[in-house]
Amino acid sequence: MLDLKDRVIMISGASRGIGRAVADHLLTQGCKVSGGMRDPSAFPETDNAMSYAYDAEDLDAPAAWVKATKERFGKIDGIVAAAGINPKVLVFSDDVESLDKMWRVNVMGPLQLVRAARAHLAEGENGRVVLMGSLAGKRVGSNVGYAMTKFAVTALNHGIRREGRADGIRSTVICPGYVATDMTIGEDEIPRTEMSRPEDLAEIITTALRLPNTASVSEMLVHCQFEPML
């Protein structure tokens, strides 16, 4: 297992939800965290934590964030792409704008971030990428637009695994069901008390970051309820 002490991890969506839980947990493990978020004041800076004004929809933003992180901490060891949105988009609707926005944030954001950081991830030969997927990326429910983006995130994960392998870069996609965050407020399929907690996902993501090159896990499916055939 890799020692996380002093490893530098970039986390998008670090101001709240899963991203914030991951940032807080990694700091307790001795990591240095670069948190990207729309409102950097929501993430207090310390010696081991920097906040950066990052908009996942802006495809030019990752390069600047990577540059700032390298200047602050001297290296980049891992990425956790936790920023995401889920406006409801149906097949038989006329809503193109919401799907375009969701595609930019959920898919193009992580892609551009990994592209911008690739050289730095390769330097230590133990670079790690964790993408926030979803069980919606394994089967289609009531929001086909969101599912489309999360299927794409799963494909992106396997592309990173293939193209980054020779440089020691390993990638894992985490696919949870319902998680009790702002994104699931209003969901009534199951009670919020039965949903996974952001802190649970933080533990799982930390495990993915620690796994050695010889025992990486490509996908982690996380269940809070019974899912047939998954």
Image (cartoon, rainbow, N blue to C red):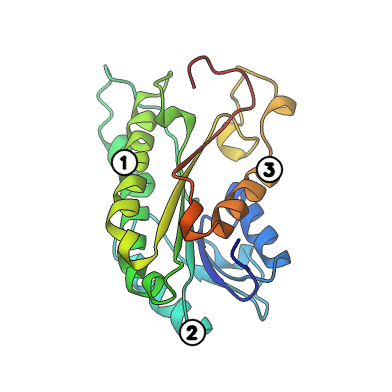
Task: Identify the residue at the far front of this view.
Answer: 214
| Image x and y of residue 6, in percent | 62, 76
Please report whichever mark, 1 or 2, sits nearer to the chain's N-terminal start. 2
Q: Residues within 10 Å of mark 1 (few under 14, many from 20)?
A: some
> For residue 140, which numbered disc appears in the image?
none
Q: Label 3 vs label 1: CA separation?
A: 24 Å
Estimate the spatial distance between the alpha carbons at disc 2 and disc 3, rounded to whole Å.
30 Å
Q: Residue under circle 3?
A: 200
Give the left or right position of residue 146, taking residue 209 as reference: left
Q: Which mark is residue 74?
A: 2
Q: Which residue is mark 1?
A: 155
Q: Is residue 204 above or below residue 2?
A: above
Q: Amino acid at mark 1?
A: Ala
Mark 3 or mark 1: which comes first in sequence?
A: 1
Residue at 47%, 56% in the rendered image = 214
- Asked whether the beta carbons under mark 2 and mark 3 sit within 8 Å of each other, the answer is no
Q: Position of residue 82 (x, y in %)?
A: 50, 50
Q: Residue at x 61, y 31 (%)?
A: 185
Q: Nearer the viewer, residue 125 or 112?
A: 125
Separation of disc 1 and disc 2 at Cα?
Answer: 30 Å
Place residue 184 in its image quadrant.
Answer: top right
Q: Earlier in the sequence, mark 2 or mark 3?
A: 2
Which amino acid type is shown beneath numbered disc 3? Answer: Asp
Mark 2, secondary structure of its residue: loop
